[in-house]
Amino acid sequence: MRLWDWALTVYARPAVAEACLNLQDGHGQNVPYLLWAAWAAGEGRTADAKAAARLMRAWDAEVGAPLRGVRRALKPARDGVADEAREALREAIKGVELKGERVLLESLEALCSPPGEPIALIDGLKAAAEASGDPPRTTALARLADALA
């Protein structure tokens, strides 16, 4: 299964979304990157972890985090701005943010080898987190691995 389709399917599970957002907001992790790592582990695909981490960090710093920041800034009501207009803009930004996540996922997928022998999800998540240079606590990664299993 292609990474984008897989990511949409698993992220729709409440426990997966909750675990991902905990890793993002509580540990500064990049959700698409972690989903890529889990998908790659499950598919037995390999990639240059450092190249993938560099790609993710640059994309997140220049595209992902700024879009997320704008979307979040538009969530509360603002004096002098009609709620309907603000919410419409927020939804438009949300759509662009999702498209950006797709571009990142497709770029990460392109770094991968063909499918092979799967590895444990937790091992794939730990390796990706380690390559990112700022791994979260193992318990937070284990929560995501359990939600994905």
Image (cartoon, rainbow, N blue to C red):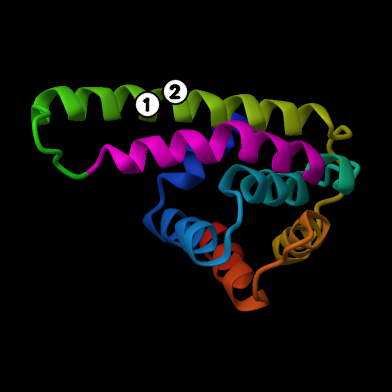
92 or 2: nearer the eye? 92
Q: Secondary structure at mark 1?
A: helix
Q: Secondary structure at mark 2?
A: helix
Picture residue at 46% right of the left edge, 30% below the top: 97
Whether residue 99 is situated above or below residue 130 in the rendered picture? above
Q: Main secondary structure of the magenta part?
A: helix
Relative to 17, is 100 on the left or the right? Answer: right
Is the residue marked by circle 2 packed among few (<14), some (14-19), or many (20+) residues within 10 Å?
some
Quarter containing the N terminus: top right
Residue on which the image places disc 2: 96
Query: Is there any visible trace of residue 57 in the rendered image?
Result: yes
Relative to 136, is 102 on the left or the right? Answer: left
Quarter location, residue 112: top right
Magenta segment range? 53-75
99 or 75: nearer the eye? 75
Quarter containing the C terminus: bottom right
Quarter location, residue 6: top right
How far is disc 2 from disc 1 in space, using C-alphas? Answer: 5 Å
Residue on which the image places disc 1: 93
Picture residue at 71% right of the left edge, 43% below the top: 57
Quarter location, residue 131: bottom right
Whether residue 37 is situated above or below residue 104 in the rendered picture? below
Mark 2 is on which residue type?
A: Val
Task: Find residue 28 and report its horizontal and vertical position in percent.
Answer: 58, 59
Q: Are marks 2 and 1 in contact (CB under 8 Å)?
A: yes
